[in-house]
Amino acid sequence: MRIAIACWQDRVSPVFDIARQLFVVTFEEGREIRRDRLLLPTGNLWDRVRILSEQGVDVLLCGAISRSLEKALESAGIRVCGFLAGECDPVLVSFANARGNAVAPARFPGRRRSGRPATRPDKSRPPTSRRRRSVAKPSPKE
């Protein structure tokens, strides 16, 4: 299995769309056998999909990721485990030890299992704690 992890200063890069560096790690029988460092081009996000696909990446571990880039990676056969945080090596090891399941402590706070933020059941109304109170308008003088 080849796992790519977007890193910035030894931590999971906060946003994959602008990440500059990846480590592509090859695991066999649960053991790391190879680690390569890749520099990603800036600009065209679709080049990232092509590069990861050419590298034979099976899984991408990253921080935040745009929905369109996530869908493009998934269409290319790359599983995306986004909205992760923490130091790269512990996140990578915990993912490998969990046999392909991202562990909860590495997730961004406030994120569901899928990585996307939880939504309110009724999007048409703001939360009750933030609802504006109507202010009585003065009646026009006659």
Image (cartoon, rainbow, N blue to C red):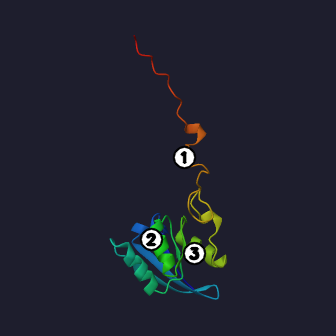
Q: Which mark is residue 92?
A: 3
Which quadrant of the structure image shows residue 138? Answer: top left
Please state, as top left, top right, bottom left or bottom right, where the N terminus lies in the image. Answer: bottom right
Q: Which mark is residue 124?
A: 1
Task: State the separation of the CA atoms marked 2 and 3.
Answer: 21 Å
Measuring 63% from the left and 73% from the top, which residue is drawn there? 94
Find numbered disc 1 in the image and state the secondary structure of the residue it sits on. Answer: loop
Q: Residue furthest front?
A: 142
Q: Which mark is residue 69?
A: 2
- The reply to whether callout 3 and callout 1 are in contact (CB within 8 Å) is no
What amino acid type is highlighted by mark number 3? Leu
Measuring 55% from the left and 38% from the top, which residue is drawn there? 130
What amino acid type is highlighted by mark number 1? Ser
Q: Is any atom of residue 2 visible in this view?
A: yes
Horizontal placement of 47 versus 75: left or right?
left
**Residue 79 position within the rendered picture, expressed as x and y whole percent measured from the top left:** 55, 77
